[in-house]
């Protein structure tokens, strides 16, 4: 009798755990969707030398908060490191040359300097954010 | 007239030389690398300096390989070391960084489909080029000399264990391979070379070596000084592969690139973590893996992203997870380099022999380092 009770309790617990991890994964997917929308918004909008720093600052802050929420879910629910979290982490690094450029004097020399930093991130093929950074740099540096 | 006689001698002795040639890897008939080393020994001041400094090719009874010492001169009994020193009437040569058997095993366990470059012509070489034991010893001496210089000049992020693993995976210590993407022993890319010459990145380290006052940098200086004014063209593959200048440049640039990435991109990000776990026994492993990871397909950004992802874990888990794939949504593996390196090291470990094999099984590539 007690054995059956134990089995039932364990089954319920494991079902609950599976359901919870599914919820956490869905939550991570949602956070990532939100993040992707903000990224599209940033790069499809009008970026100028004047508004670049402000727009990037907001985007980086939002992205860091997204990554933190994903990491917390992964740790709390003992999930494997998700591709979504790793993508946000990588994108935050890939956008750095543009962030550094926005904080510089945006001179010709800065253009070359940060274009080189961006190229270093694409040695083994293009990555969407690095390509977007390259396009923005080209646009702002030819003006 | 003399020229004709000399040519005839060379033509007649070539097959004899090829027959006598003992290759660690490659075919005795493919002698371009052997010829490069022979020429460099006779004509190149950097190669001559390395031979002199490390007493390469000097054969005395006292420095003959010790059969009971696991191939390491450092393990010679103290008395015998003294005899050797007295016999040579000069101080002992500096220690070579890697054990010869490890270099030979790494060399034979490696295969590449990339074209082999004949130098000085720069044409694609024929056959599989012969690499002799002497060639590997010379390479070992160059790496040892340049690492010594870099450390004396205060470069950080330089780790011999990581260098052994990196060069094993990149080329298996074969300097002659070059494709459109990578060249030579470190498989340097054009972007990497460009980075070494950037004023805000590698240039300052190159300058530091070029202006170094320490005699440990005498050899490295011979590359750094002229390169400050004249950046070699990446399309000239021999500039990064040939013995005497190219292979040596490849080693120097690899070290400068490693320091640049470590100091500019990775150390500032990892600093709080290193501080927090300073007393943890796994922290050096974390550091080493992080440096190596920057060579992966995701570059320094990927290595920095991996730090972001793994900093939430204690060092033992950080190191463990660094050896597993860490995929992004776009299909990039943030730990591509460190997860592949493990496989390569397992192959090397299997092919070693005797005590070295046991040491390698216990402590990995650290077993391949001479006490340095």
Image (cartoon, rainbow, N blue to C red):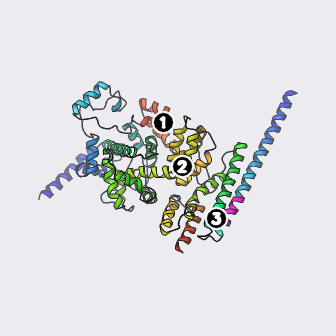
Which mark's residue is nearer the viewer, 3 or 1? 3
For the residues labelled 1 and 2, say whether their Cβ atoms are less than 8 Å apart.
no
Secondary structure character of the magenta stretch overall: helix
Camera-nearest label, 1 or 2 = 2
**Location of residue A101 in the rendering, given as x and y in whole percent from the top left corner:** 55, 63
Q: Report in which chain the residue with disc 3 lies.
A: A
Q: Which residues are magenta?
A: A33-42
Q: Quadrant of the N terminus of chain B?
A: bottom left
Tell me, yes or no, whether the highlighted magenta stretch contains residue B329.
no
Residue at disc 2, secondary structure = helix
- Residue B203 relative to residue B272: left or right: left
Question: On the image, which quarter does residue A99 sit in?
Answer: bottom right
Judged left or right of residue B341, residue B326 is right
Which mark, residue A54?
Answer: 3
Residue position marked by numbered label 2 in the rendering: B268
Measure the C-alpha gap from mark 1 to mark 2.
28 Å
CA distance for labels 2 and 3: 24 Å
Nearer the observer, B56 or B351:
B56
Read off the chain for label 1. Answer: B
Disc on res. B364: 1
Q: Is B250 left, or right, of A56 in this rendering?
A: left
Label 3 – label 1 distance at C-alpha:
49 Å
């Amino acid at each position: 009798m007690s054995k059956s009770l134990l089995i039932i309790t364990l089954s319920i617990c494991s079902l609950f755990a599976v359901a919870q991890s599914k919820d956490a994964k869905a939550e991570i997917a949602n956070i990532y969707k939100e993040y992707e929308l903000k990224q599209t918004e940033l790069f499809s909008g009008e970026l100028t030398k004047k508004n670049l720093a402000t727009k990037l600052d907001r985007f980086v802050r939002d992205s860091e908060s997204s990554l933190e929420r994903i990491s917390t879910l992964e740790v709390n629910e003992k999930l494997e490191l998700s591709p979504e979290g790793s993508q946000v982490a990588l994108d935050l690094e890939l956008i750095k040359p543009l962030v550094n450029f926005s904080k510089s004097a945006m001179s010709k020399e800065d253009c070359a300097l940060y274009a080189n930093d961006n190229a270093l991130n694409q040695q083994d093929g293009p990555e969407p954010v690095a390509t977007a950074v390259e396009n923005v740099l080209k646009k702002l540096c030819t003006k | 007239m003399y020229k004709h006689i000399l040519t005839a001698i060379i033509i007649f002795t070539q097959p004899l030389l090829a027959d006598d040639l003992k290759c660690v890897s490659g075919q005795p008939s493919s002698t371009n690398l052997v010829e490069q080393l022979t020429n460099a020994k006779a004509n190149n001041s950097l190669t001559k300096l390395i031979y002199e400094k490390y007493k390469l090719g000097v054969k005395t009874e006292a420095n003959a390989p010790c059969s009971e010492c696991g191939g390491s001169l450092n393990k010679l009994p103290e008395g015998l070391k003294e005899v050797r020193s007295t016999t040579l009437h000069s101080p002992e040569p500096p220690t070579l960084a890697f054990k010869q058997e490890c270099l030979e095993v790494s060399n034979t366990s490696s295969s590449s489909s990339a074209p082999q470059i004949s130098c000085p012509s720069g044409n694609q070489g024929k056959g599989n080029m012969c690499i002799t034991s002497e060639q590997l010893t010379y390479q070992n001496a160059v790496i040892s000399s340049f690492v010594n210089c870099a450390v004396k000049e205060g470069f950080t992020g330089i780790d011999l264990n990581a260098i052994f693993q990196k060069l094993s995976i990149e080329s298996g210590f074969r300097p002659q391979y070059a494709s459109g993407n990578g060249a030579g022993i470190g498989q340097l890319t054009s972007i990497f070379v460009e980075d070494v010459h950037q004023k805000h990145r590698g240039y300052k380290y190159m300058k530091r070596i070029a202006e170094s006052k320490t005699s440990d940098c005498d050899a490295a200086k011979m590359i750094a000084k002229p390169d400050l004014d004249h950046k070699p063209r990446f399309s000239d593959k021999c500039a990064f592969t040939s013995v005497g200048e190219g292979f040596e440049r490849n080693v120097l640039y690899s070290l400068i690139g490693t320091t640049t990435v470590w100091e500019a991109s990775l150390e500032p990000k990892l600093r709080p973590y290193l501080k927090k776990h300073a007393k943890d026994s796994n922290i050096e492993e974390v550091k080493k893996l992080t440096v190596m990871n920057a060579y992966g397909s995701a570059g320094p950004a990927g290595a920095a992203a991996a730090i972001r992802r793994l900093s939430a874990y204690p060092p033992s888990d950080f190191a463990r997870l660094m050896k597993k794939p860490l995929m992004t949504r776009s299909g990039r593996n943030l730990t591509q380099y460190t997860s592949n390196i493990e496989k390569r090291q397992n192959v090397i470990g299997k092919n070693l022999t005797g005590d070295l094999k046991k040491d390698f099984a216990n402590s990995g590539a650290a077993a391949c380092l001479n006490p340095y």
